[in-house]
Image (cartoon, grey):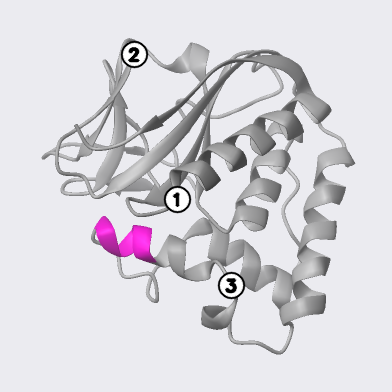
Amino acid sequence: MWQMGANLPVQLAVIEMKGLTVVRNNAAYEKLVACAAEYRERYEYTAVSKVEGVQAARKFFRAIGIEPTRRRPSSEALLQRALKKKDLYIINTLVDVSNWCSLDFLLPICVYDAEKINGDVTIRIGEAGDGYLALNNREINLENRYLLADDNGAFGSPMTDSQRTAISTKTKHAFLGIFAPLDYDQGRLNMQSNIYAERVIEFCGGEVVDIQIYRPA
């Protein structure tokens, strides 16, 4: 079961999927690269702040107490790399699809191996001692930060996720998340959740177990 704490000015769409086959190949990565090229063709000489859709992720970050001009949302970081013709990272099909969707939707996206999550998940503000070893190999402190936690403690955040619940080629069951500000249109968020799931099925197989949009209690 997932639940969101009270008074958090954000929403999170969560897609649960099973029966996945995660591999390392270029198939989904090529979609990410093509999406980057489309942005570059349209916005190469435009300031990032003026790109349609960028402000939603910035608003989300400000809502959780992070200044987005100092620490960029992951979606905006992908956009910047695209506009500057920098290489994009290839990881595996599930992560590559997730990065493609993050760039396409211009919203931060998370993806977790469900088998590495223990017990119920709570979306809340971090307390003293909350933190983890992140995907960038750094220990991050999440006190007073927006995070996701299970019975073993924090495992995810909009900034960077933990190594504990990271996706690998052994992942068969996953939770996919899309972060958005509270006033983001729920119909649009639901549509994007379905697109995300369809793209995962195309490149990783599997099936959707559930799609939920979590908002403040």
Tell me the residue that label 3 is attached to: 52
The three-letter code of the residue at mark 2 reads: Met
Task: Residue under label 1, please give it.
Answer: 185
What kind of residue is marked 3? Glu
Residue 179 as seen in the image, left or right of residue 17: left
Instruction: Give the answer, above or below, for where 178 lies relative to 116.
Output: below
Seen at 63% across and 33% down, the residue is 194
Label 3 to label 2, Cα distance in Å? 35 Å
Please report the residue visible at 74 percent of the width from the left and 59 percent of the height from the top: 88
Q: Residue at x 47, y 16 (%)?
A: 116
Evaluate whether residue 175 shows in this view: yes
Dominant SS in magenta: helix
Q: Amino acid at mark 1?
A: Asp
Lower sequence index among marks 1 and 2: 2
Q: Nearer the viewer, mark 1 or mark 3?
A: 1
Residue reaching furthest to the bottom: 45
Question: In x, y percent, where is residue 92?
Answer: 74, 35
Please say whether residue 135 is visible from this viewpoint.
no
Kind of element beneath mark 1: loop
Mark 3 and mark 2 lie on one chain; the one further toward the N terminus is 2
Which of the 4 image quarters holds residue 164?
Answer: top left
Residue 114 pos. (x, y %):
50, 17
* Percent x, y of residue 98: 65, 41
Return the disc, 1 or 3, that comes first in the chain's sequence.
3
Q: Magenta segment range?
A: 59-64
In the displayed orientation, state which residue is furthest to the left. 128
Badge 1 local density, few (<14 within 10 Å), some, or many (20+)? few
SS of the residue at dot 3?
loop
Q: Which residue is mark 2?
A: 1
Q: Is residue 179 left or right of residue 23?
A: left
